[in-house]
Amino acid sequence: MQMQPIAARFAGGPARSADVAQPNRDDFRLIGVTKHFDRDQEIFSEGDRADLVYKVVSGAVRSCRVLADGRRQICDFYLPGDVFGVEFEPTRRATAEALVDTVLIVARRSVVVEEFGQGEALWRHALRDLQRSQDHVLTLGRRSATERLASFLLDLTERLGGASEFDLPMSRQDIADYLGLTIETVSRTLTQLQVQGFIQLHGCRHIRLARRAALADLCE
Amino acid sequence: MQMQPIAARFAGGPARSADVAQPNRDDFRLIGVTKHFDRDQEIFSEGDRADLVYKVVSGAVRSCRVLADGRRQICDFYLPGDVFGVEFEPTRRATAEALVDTVLIVARRSVVVEEFGQGEALWRHALRDLQRSQDHVLTLGRRSATERLASFLLDLTERLGGASEFDLPMSRQDIADYLGLTIETVSRTLTQLQVQGFIQLHGCRHIRLARRAALADLCE
DNA sequence: CGGCCTTTTGAGTGTGTTCAAATAGGGTGG
DNA sequence: CCACCCTATTTGAACACACTCAAAAGGCCG
């Protein structure tokens, strides 16, 4: 993990260089330092003190919880532009790890709160997590494997900027643990979506959503 | 739905009459009117304007979302003492309905916010929903039917005051739609838990948790 | 080119589902 | 208070989707 000596100031205002974080249309500002995390490196762990908040500059992050016997559930993925790590209890409820080589802006929560009164901007980011968790509950409770994959891919492309061709930042195992499936089921379902012409895979990470509307129909 | 003419003031302070809401150990106060809802009556609906917040006095409430083809997912149950309906978007993301005959205190969100500055007390209640959604994700993604039922029953008894014998306020179908199972699986699993001596059922609503520690072990 | 890890594919199994029917329970009216 | 009805719940049997275990194929990096 490398730390840049200069403080980075991150505002919702002016556009920044191209392949980095796309602007989030909110007024959240984060004053902190940029840090680099290697693939699979832990950012914070369940039980840690939760005094820092993060914003993804590039790369991707998974947030997950593990049951006693090792079963892992990925709660969410964080992509460039996303803020994460805003908690309201003193300790972390999940572990965060870099999916790939990742650059984050890290700030003390207290500093952000001071700068913005009641920290309402932060609450709003936690809210986003809430809404996504609620959507996730619908997916996990009621959808078939095909529906899960289809809505996952559509969600991903939107959050990555909307291009119908992109690289998956996560492994099949990560997708499985996010969608509540096994790695084999994820693989088989993707193959099946490809055979049916909904998607095209080039290598296992690069994907093209060939028929997005049809894919959306699959989600119910 | 009957409306009491007198405004009810609801504080975390002095204890109230016995079989009604147990105190929540927070400083949230809700100034509003009490309303009565019949079994299965809608309290608010997905898409409605979200300008009211609620506190359960007696009875119970389910919050749910429905997929296009009718599959229903119950997001959460609200029990006496619980505050619900705090949203951060202008419209409701879920539908709320009374599980049984239910008394609620209803307040304008704006009034509550005015009274408490940034409405931080309200944020805290939304936070509770977030944490419960996240826990629910773990359950739905990674747990077996038996584990789901066991943790559901333990959660319920805690929230109802801790007694090991109590009445389920919801139907088997509600439980199924909450846990992401079918009604048949819920029924079979409860029967199995009874045969194994973990619980005792007297009528389908009254339940006794015979061996709570053992039940907790089932949850992983 | 070789080794290692990830992904894909195959075959068989199992948990939970589906469809169907029986039973129990609760409410109502006689 | 009892009989009846209606709905909710339980039980049964067969099925299906996703899982498990196993092996082959593909990628990536040295």
Image: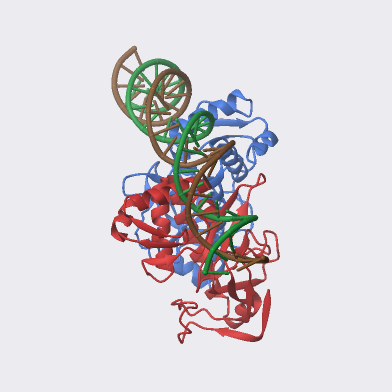
Chain colours: A blue, B red, C brown, D green
Say left or right for B214 vs B97.
left
**Where A45 sits versus A171, above or below?**
below
| Residue A61 position within the rendered picture, expressed as x and y whole percent measured from the top left | 46, 47
**Where A140 sits versus C24, above or below?**
above
| Residue B68 position within the rendered picture, expressed as x and y whole percent measured from the top left | 67, 46
Q: Is residue A78 visible?
A: no
**Where A116 sits versus B134, above or below?**
below
- Corner quadrant of residue C20: top right
**Picture residue at 50% right of the left edge, 67% below the top:** A112
Quarter of the image for the N terminus of chain B: give it.
Answer: bottom right
Instruction: Choose between B170 and D21: the one closer to the eye.
Output: B170
Q: Is residue B115 visible?
A: yes
**Where C18 sits versus A77, above or below?**
above
Say left or right for B62 vs A73.
right
Say left or right for B118 vs D11.
right
Count of all numbered marks drawn on residues in the image? 0
Instruction: Choose between B9 and C3: the one closer to the eye.
Output: B9
**Picture residue at 70% right of the left edge, 66% below the top:** B49
**Picture residue at 68% right of the left edge, 64% below the top:** B90
- Corner quadrant of residue A156: top right
| Residue B132 position within the rendered picture, expressed as x and y whole percent measured from the top left | 47, 60
**Picture residue at 57% right of the left edge, 75% below the top:** B119
| Residue A188 position within the rendered picture, expressed as x and y whole percent measured from the top left | 50, 28
